[in-house]
Image (spheres, coloured by chain):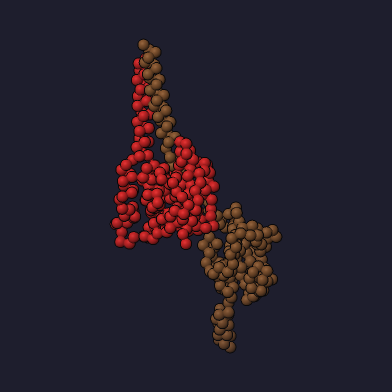
Chain colours: A red, B brown
Amino acid sequence: MKNAFNIFLITLSIVFFTLAGFQVYLRLNPSRTLAVSTVGFEKYRYPQVFDQVDEIVVLSNPIRIQIEDLGINLPIFQSRINNDVWETTDKGASYLVETPVPGDKGNSVIYGHNWNGLFANLVNTKSGQIVKVEYEDGSTKEFVVDHTSIVGPDNSEILAFSEKPILTIYTCTGFLDSQRFVVVATLKQ
Amino acid sequence: MNKNKSILMVTAFALSLGFVSPVEAAGGAPDFGTCVAPKGEVIASYANGVHGIPGKRETFKGSDTVYKISQDVVLQCFCPENGKGIQTNWLRAKDLSKTEIAKLRKQGWVYIATGSVWGLDDVAYLAKNVEYTCKAGVATKGLANTGNLFLLNTLLLGGMTTAALAFLLKKFRK
């Protein structure tokens, strides 16, 4: 009986370590780093279904975010909040579609994991750095980092409406990723 | 005689169509659009301040932008901190008949003797307020979970604990 329990504990231990290893893989995944940083973004530009129609409907949704000073160059995926759970992706940055399109009046929100190849370097953002956002229609807008801050995970004030077009970018930081590093950038005129 | 009378009536009706005011022609007030997507020329804009709203005695604090849609039509968009905005539709009453004014007042329009105190032309206006949402903030209890260190450490701790338990169990069994 004790032997069976011992085997159960060892099995459980292996499961825990395997899952922990997967989490480490998610953080450090070198293939993702390679994919999002060096491969062109053309394949993300339009959904595949558009290849089958004559007329491409061009929307002005953001499709890519770049902060050259930090080596951040990521595709943007649309996301929503479902029952207070934010959709996230490990393939790029997430744009919260409930917020205005970056550059429009209001507070646009983009967020992503603090993993290698994603927003790991976001914590090194400094005021004055340029954030570029590319749109589906091929246009680009530039934002200037105004300030950064560290807030708690429940601080939804960073999502508050703004009279001016601002871009809020955030990722996890701090002890056990318990805080959020927030970058606020204003539209470059 | 009857034929002449009929011709006269038809002519009078046809002529009357040409003199119908925009209010009557539209069956009510003209189209003001909405402050959510306002149109027209901005003739006044205040980022912050205390503003009056026609038909309301109290004053309101917030931003205020006024759009001139046409010579007779003005749109005022007021937005307070709480996001419950007030859109005021302004219609010049100068060219309206008493019947038209009475009709609009029955529909909730307020008669303003002169627009000059509101920064508009020194003529009579009719005004009507409509509520709108001007600050569409995101309603959520918290932010996204964009890290996995807590989960990672929990799993490592769980793995080490169960491994230690298994080791101790084996040791004590001996």
Quadrant of residue B12 in the image? bottom right
Give residue A108's position: percent from left, percent from top: 47, 53
Residue located 52% across and 41% down the image = A152
Give residue A57's position: percent from left, percent from top: 36, 60
Residue located 63% across and 70% down the image = B120
Tell me if B174 is positioned left or right of A180 in this view.
left
Q: Is residue A130 above or below residue B76?
A: above
Q: Is residue A13 above or below residue A77?
A: above
Residue located 66% across and 64% down the image = B54
Residue located 62% across and 64% down the image = B128
Quarter that holds the N terminus of chain B: bottom right
Quarter that holds the C terminus of chain B: top left
Q: Is residue A144 above or below residue A33?
A: below
Quadrant of residue A123 in the image? top left
**Tally of marks:** 0
Give residue B63's position: percent from left, percent from top: 60, 59
Task: Report the residue that reaches farthest toward the top.
Answer: B174
Give residue A30's position: percent from left, percent from top: 32, 42
Q: In the depicted view, which residue is nearer to us: A2 or B131?
A: A2
User: Is residue A162 shown to the viewer in this render?
Assistant: yes
Q: In the depicted view, which residue is nearer to us: B6 or B12?
A: B12
Tell me if B22 is positioned left or right of A188 in this view.
right
